Amino acid sequence: MVTEALAEARGRGPEIPAQSARPVLTIDGLKTHFFTRDGVVRAVDGVSYELERGETLGVVGESGCGKSITALSVMGLVPSPPGRIVAGTIRLDGVNLLTLSESQMRQIRGNDISMIFQEPMTSLNPVLKIGRQLTEAIRLHQGLGKRDALTRAVEMLRLVHIPEAERRVQQYPFELSGGMRQRVMIAMALSCNPKVLIADEATTALDVTIQAQILNLMLELREKLGTAIIMITHDLGVVAETAQRVVVMYAGKVVEEAPVRELFRRPLHPYTKGLLASIPRLPTQGSRRRHERTRLNEIPGIVPALKDMPPGCRFAPRCAYAVDRCRREEPPLASRTPGHFTACWEADRLMAEAEHG
């Protein structure tokens, strides 16, 4: 699936749905810090991006780059203490969510914005039946009675292709397979027809076959319900398969943003280029002798500690393109071509290499 998806991203790519004038979600200058005894951890440090209506936006990067904390900030679920949003805005249809009270956020969370978490067994209550957990959000946000909410829950399970839905609502999470539990999480997240769905590594723990089914299901539901999706992942194959645009994060910041085809065809940040180069590929016939082995490309070094960032560009200590300016001055996220933004002082060199390579 990954190889075909990458080929599609470099070629035709998924169709981008028609958009309205205003994005459904706008994150601007978001800073979410954690105040610990060892210092201030700048988990999200000035992140900005937009989500258009009906699109799928991929957010990629190494573990600890701030992908999930950005999502938790949007949901209003950052643990406090020690976490706190110290700057920025998060606007849903023009309304700044950071100005709302907790009771107002409860009306939005699960209703207008929903989230699918990585591991369903830690998100589903093991001692409550599936039907009880599904109907809770439906009754809260839709104002339905117990019987009508259960009927709606059964309909949602059918929508996500769970067989024998009437029987499944009477079962406990441990009685379902991993793929089934993930489908229940999707049904729960979509039960109130949200405007925005955040999928945080929603397919990571699943085998390849079930992963493909879940991804196809999410795209099918996006077409049916018009929900905009933020797909948080470290898997570039998933991004190529599902997204129209991609945001690449590193050490709490956005370092590149582009349409998916453009990003795979011409990455303009060394970190993105390194991620793409590290994807395992099968050798083509005749490309090398069978007994030869090649080492996977890797990005040298490690991600810097978020409480002790180096001066200048945060990727400079690991970057083969870094010059003195990179180690002194932090590059801004700037437009290089229409719709393609990158935070790199040496982006012109990468662009020239891509054009001549």
Image (cartoon, rainbow, N blue to C red):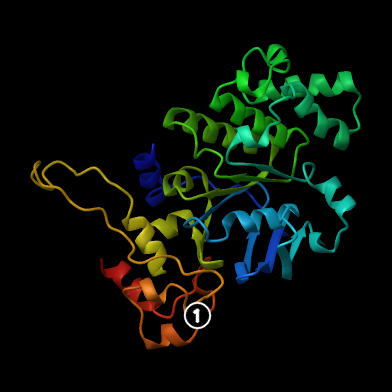
Instruction: Decide: is 266 above or below 40.
Output: above
Residue at 24%, 42% in the rendered image: 282
Give the image location of residue 65, x and y in percent: 53, 61
Residue 133 found in image quarter: top right
- Counting labels gives 1
Give the image location of residue 32, x and y in percent: 67, 66
Residue type at tag 1:
Pro
Query: Is 209 on the left-hand or right-hand side of 83?
Result: left
Residue 193 found in image quarter: top right
The quadrant in which the N terminus is found is top left
Give the image location of residue 9, x and y in percent: 41, 49
Instruction: Decide: is 250 above or below 148.
Output: below
Query: Is 64 on the left-hand or right-hand side of 264?
Result: right
Q: Which residue is mark 1?
A: 331
**Most extreme residue toward the front, as rendered?**
37
Instruction: Look at the image and tell me whether residue 23 can be seen.
Output: no
Q: Secondary structure at mark 1?
A: loop
Between 136 and 289, the one lying in front of the other is: 136
Between 167 and 301, the one lying in front of the other is: 301
Residue at 49%, 86% in the rendered image: 329
Query: Is 196 on the left-hand or right-hand side of 291?
Result: right
